[in-house]
Amino acid sequence: MDYYRIVTDPGAVGGWFPAEPTCRDGSEVDARTFTRCEEYRGVSTHGAPLSLAAAREGWPMPITFGPFDMPVVLGVVGRKFLDAAPDDVQVVAVDISQVQVMILNVSKYVNCINEERTLGEKWRAHLS
């Protein structure tokens, strides 16, 4: 089986950059919450969906990454991920004004790195 990493094309200009998700009361939800391969069980204020503002304005891309590589996808893309891997991903709907957007939360970790053939330094995220 092949594994892939999705990266943002530096030539893709005009796309937006999402900010940290927030609850209705304005409190931030740490974007790293959605990069830990754990199911998101947070409840936003009054059970309402999270909100997602643009840290940089632009058009919504089908797949983009917010702070700390938090995956953000258009609703149609999120549903495709759910169809393909219902036990391995979670989509968290967020409110924005223009289109349906979801945070894509990968909930299954697969160690697919061949340590013996890897050259380079490891980078570990410092989670608070």
Image (tube, rainbow, N blue to C red):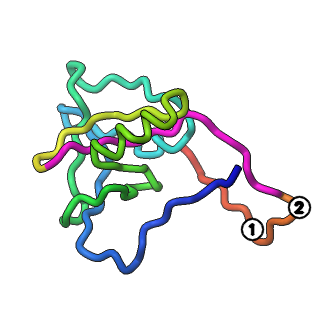
Q: Which element carries disc 1, helix, strand or loop?
A: loop
**Residue 33 position (above or below residue 113):** above
Main secondary structure found in the magenta portion:
loop
Residue 109 percent location from the top left of the image: 64, 39
Residue 39 percent location from the top left of the image: 50, 28
Residue 91 falls left or right of residue 46:
right
Of 59 and 20, nearer the camera is 59
**Residue 117 position (above or below residue 38):** below
Look at 29% across and 61% down and name the residue there. 17
Residue 28 falls left or right of residue 10:
left
Q: Which mark is residue 47?
A: none
Residue type at numbered disc 1? Glu
Furthest toward the bottom, the residue is 11
Of 18 and 104, nearer the camera is 104
Residue 34 falls left or right of residue 38:
left
Residue type at numbered disc 2? Glu
Q: Which element carries disc 2, helix, strand or loop?
A: helix
Q: Which residue is mark 1?
A: 121
Q: Which residues are magenta?
A: 99-114
Look at 25% across and 63% down and name the residue there. 16
Q: Is residue 77 magenta?
A: no
Of the numbered discs 1 and 2, the one sitting upstream in the chain is 2
The number of discs equals 2
CA distance for labels 1 and 2? 13 Å
Residue 44 percent location from the top left of the image: 28, 26
Look at 34% across and 49% down and name the residue there. 73
Q: Which residue is mark 2?
A: 116
